[in-house]
Image (cartoon, rainbow, N blue to C red):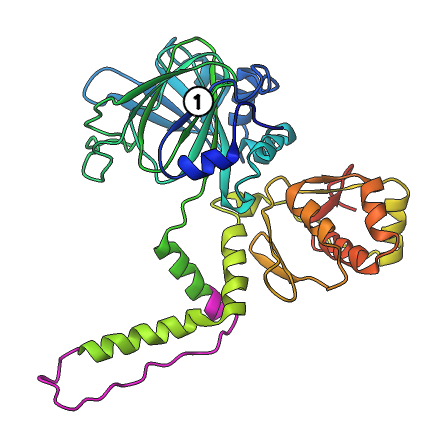
Amino acid sequence: MTLNNFDWQNFLTHYWQKKPCVIKNALASDALSFLTPEDLAGLAMEEDVESRIVIEKAGQVPWELKRGPFSEEDFTSTPATHWTLLVQGVNHWLPKAAELLTAFDAIPRWRLDDVMVSYAPTEGGVGPHYDHYDVFLIQGKGIREWRLTRQFCTPDNYLPNMQLRLMDKFPIEETHILEPGDMLYLPAKVGHWGISRSDDCMTWSVGYRSLAAREMLEHFADFAARESIAAQWFEDPSWLNIAHPAEITQAATQQARNALAALLADEATFHRWFGQFVTEPQGHQGSLLSLPPERTIPLDRFKRRIAQGEGLSADLMSRWAQDTTQSPRLLHINGETTAIDMNTDQSLLDRLCAHYDHDSDILLNFIQDNEANAILLHGLWQAGILHWSEENDD
């Protein structure tokens, strides 16, 4: 899938993480019609799918939040207007939704959070708010009005005593109307308020994860402990002429900073950690990754099954990234790292990281004359990262 009327070079230079951008007819008007409101409601009724309903109400508490999974009664009891259903991670459940991501491959896949889809009747929305991540908002069905502001996007501008973090002050600076196929890009910390202007409004949200320094530091500390990274020790500065026995000197603080910096300075360690950090499944996703029973068929039988026409597929929830700056090259999958044999084709790694499904004829071309390629695929299948396309297990 590709975007229309869109220049990635111009966008990344002038808009990405800088300012909002509206792209009319970015996709064909029916490109996302494969998912209906009924389909979305069906997903929201599944135990493993993260979903919410937001209802705008009159009174002292103007917004109500409900969390799924939902029942048919939950939907039949909703009001005629002023409510929204939101379903997270639709790309983890629907292959066609995962295909949407190919339209955004100018940005690394490991930056992605997930694809969320919302449905709303007339006047439905989730209220004025801002996020800490970048997002592309694509109109799949119906019409939505977007109101934007850059003012008061601060932690002290929230409505009190609310389940939702909604902005109190929201001076409207821009208004945009999106119809099917139109797309709005929003960088982090731009206030936005989307309101349905039709009875069948469906909006797709391609969101990109925020990488908070505190979160990275916590993860690195866990990684260092788990990987038994060599310790770096605090070295005492000179204690000559301290003014008081309880004093923390500038030199002592600098030595502490030096010890931490030394821990982060090892290039190979840092690359391995970062790849694991950005591919680690988020939230409840990790517990939902399907794991097969023990797989022990030998390599020759594995290759024979591919030759007989069986393809391989990755779990839609799996997260892949590669680091070709290191020697050996590193393949990161779901927070784990594999060092790649020097004889493995780079084109095979590129394909594995960009696609979920791999036809047997394509795989056969890779493994016929390259044992390293076959060994990599066999190892990923044994680890449960890849499955036979027609089966969940062997």
What residue is shown at x 46% (from left), y 38% (from top)? 12
State which quadrant residue 90 falls in: top right
SS category of the residue bearing label 1: strand
Q: Nearer the viewer, residue 124 or 18?
A: 18
Q: Nearer the viewer, residue 140 or 222?
A: 140
Which residue lies under the disc numbered 1? 85
Q: Is residue 308 left or right of residue 265?
A: right
Q: Which residues are magenta?
A: 223-248
Q: Amino acid at mark 1?
A: Leu
- Residue 2 picture location, percent across and down: 60, 28
- Extreme residue in the left direction: 243
Q: Is residue 193 left or right of residue 220?
A: left
Please say if 212 is above or below 177.
below
- Residue 95 picture location, percent across and down: 65, 31
Q: Is residue 140 left or right of residue 197?
A: right
Q: Residues within 10 Å of mark 1 (few under 14, many from 20)?
A: many
Task: Please say whether residue 24 is visible from this viewpoint.
Answer: yes
Q: Main secondary structure of the magenta part?
A: loop
Please say if 89 is above or below 247.
above
What residue is shown at x 24% (from left), y 75% (from top)? 253
Q: Nearer the viewer, residue 44 or 90?
A: 90
